[in-house]
Amino acid sequence: MVGKLSKADKKIAYDAKLCQLLDEYSQVLIVAADNVGSNQLQSIRRGLRGDSIVLMGKNTMMKRSVRIHSENTGNKAFLNLIPLLVGNVGLIFTKGDLKEVSEEVAKYKVGAPARVGLVAPIDVIVPPGNTGLDPSQTSFFQVLNIPTKINKGTVEIITPVELIKKGEKVGSSEAALLSKLGIRPFSYGLVVLSVYDNGSVFSPEVLDLTEDDLVEKFAAGVSLVTSLALAISYPTLAAAPHFFTNAYKNVLAVAVATEYTFPQAEKVKEFLEDPSKFAVSAAPVADAGAAAAPVAAKEEEKKEEPAEESDDDMGFSLFD
């Protein structure tokens, strides 16, 4: 029978496992594990099984292992993980798509009651409606200044009430009331705090960017580069079309103001010398529209004539 490992042996085994994962995986999700139970963590491990591994541990031990492994391998990129190991955090090593893994982790959230002394992660609002409580329970509502009325022998909340604000500690009265109402206002699970990818560290919000978002940001960057290049007259590929257009306008303006000419400017000068040529192309269109009106009127009259004859032909004249 194999005896239990000592603390020193456990640390050696943990260090070896962490170093192995660092060598094998290049992508790591740093997750917060506040208020996450062991059963919930096992469910997350089962859900990620295949291409991801969840590793929890003490921050000091993880930092030490990462630092020593970075020195032994000469890979300084591992050191970027150390500042992220703050608080109750864990590591998810993955070879899958980071966005998909992050979404899978977010699925495993469990509802939790409001315990006394717990800091509320969100605002807690009690909705209006029948509570199902008998009138003797109105003292809870009176203490919390919740407007109620008695309806069919039960207490009914009249208007929605913000019971707890985000960041406030849950009091005994609030916890007791929520428990009586059967409301579990909070939900907990692993929350992705940062993403490590081949030495680069970035916010998880980056994973939510779509191709349209990237195209929009790229277009905005090109617009800024173009504006700057035009302002300082510095030639760039993005500003080149604008430089050519402005240059053509300047040359055309000189040609119009002087006797200097070139093929593209001759037509402009011709129009400026005889403005009536602007209306030449529009006249035939107007004449055609005017001529089309009588023709259309005649066609409508022709269509109406057979309708009058049809009554007589069938023997159903209205005037007989």
Image (cartoon, grey):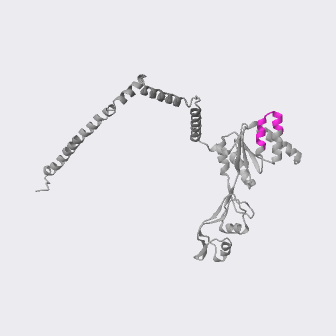
Foreground residue among 94 and 192 = 192
Q: Among all residues in the image, which is located at the extreme left? A: 320
The residue lying toward the viewer, choosing from 18 and 283, is 283
Q: Left or right: where does residue 227 sit relative to residue 123?
A: left
Q: Is residue 175 visible?
A: yes
Q: Please, which residue is most extreme toward the front here?
A: 258
- In the rendered image, the vertical position of residue 137 relative to residue 19, given as above or below: below
- The x, y position of residue 196, in whole percent, is 72, 41
Front position in the image: 304 or 263: 263
**Which quadrant of the view contains residue 48?**
top right
Please give the range of residues in magenta. Answer: 68-82
Number of dots carrying numbers:
0
Q: Quadrant of the C terminus?
A: bottom left
Q: Is residue 40 left or right of residue 68?
A: left
Left/right placement of residue 193 relative to residue 2 reads left
In the depicted structure, whether residue 61 falls above or below residue 121: above
The picture places residue 15, in percent across and down from the top left corner, at 83, 42
